[in-house]
Image (tube, rainbow, N blue to C red):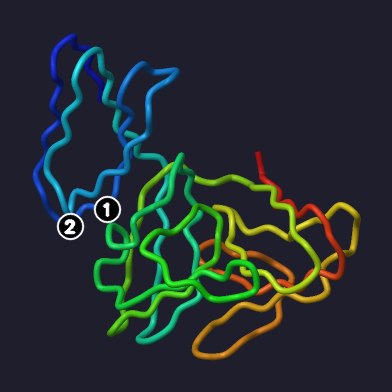
Amino acid sequence: MGKWGRTKLTLVWKMGSDPIHRAKAGCASTGNSVCVSQRRKSTISENGLSLFNKFVSQSDTFNLKTGWNLTSLPFQSDSNFPLADFFPEAQTAYVFNDGKYVETNNITSGKGFWVKIPEDKTYTFIGDPLNAYTETFAEGWHMVGSSFYSAQPITEPENCIKAIFVYKNGAYQQTTTLDPGFGYWIKIQEDCELKTSSPF
């Protein structure tokens, strides 16, 4: 869905329980991506020559439990995702940066984070899938996310990963695969580049 115009262009929709969609404002090749939640707002406007394009690519379902959940969002984004747009019931959330926990109101594509919710809840999200990602890590513990497809991470140099843990049903479990929708603790033995593979 898209429309060109030289004056202010406004896109309006009915508010409801639909998941978040992404809109692009500006020229197709240089426009800024805008994250839009149909639960929280019903219109966006842009001055000048504008293109609004609604993308609906893939969906993923998250089954979160009461209390703390270690999760991640396997979707592409040009900027951070507002936590409240995805998890409006969230009581708090934390990321792990530079060896310590930091409370956050925003979450980053492909990054792991802790989120606390008051009751069991199923969320369904739609967006452009994060097919793969590459990150550089120093020796030590890191919290990472998944891509949209299950993958076994590879490193350069090889065999830099000492252990990977996922948090499910209130307990840690050791794993070798990064599945979508979960966050992970990963122990790196030496400075390295980590990649997740894509089926495409």
Residue that mark 2 sits on? 17
Q: Name the residue under label 1.
A: 19
Q: Position of residue 38 (x, y in %)?
A: 19, 49
The image position of residue 2, as x and y in percent, is: 25, 21
Residue furthest right as drawn: 158
Where's residue 48, x and y in %? 21, 14
Q: Would residue 57 appear left or right of 109 to someone viewing this image?
A: left
Identified at 28% across, 84% down, the residue is 118
Within 10 Å of disc 2 (Cα), the crowding (few <14, some 14-19, many 20+) is few
**Residue type marked 2:** Ser
Does residue 118 appear to the left or right of 74 in the view shown? left
Rounded to the nearest whole Å, what is the CA distance between mark 2 and mark 1? Answer: 6 Å
Image position of 200 with respect to 190: above or below: above
Q: Going 35% across and 39% down the picture, which residue do you hit?
A: 56
**What amino acid does circle 1 point to?**
Pro
Q: In the figure, 70 relative to 9: above or below? A: below
Observer-nearest residue: 19 or 110? 110
The reply to whether discs 2 and 1 touch (Cβ–Cβ < 8 Å) is no
Split into 4 quadrants, where in the image is the N terminus? top left
Secondary structure of the residue carrying numbered label 1: loop
Could you say which quadrant of the image residue 55 lies in?
top left
Residue 78 located left or right of residue 34:
right
Disc 2, SS = loop
- Residue at image position (22%, 17%) is 3
Q: In which quarter of the image is residue 141?
A: bottom right
Q: Which residue appears at 44% of the width and 18% of the height?
A: 29
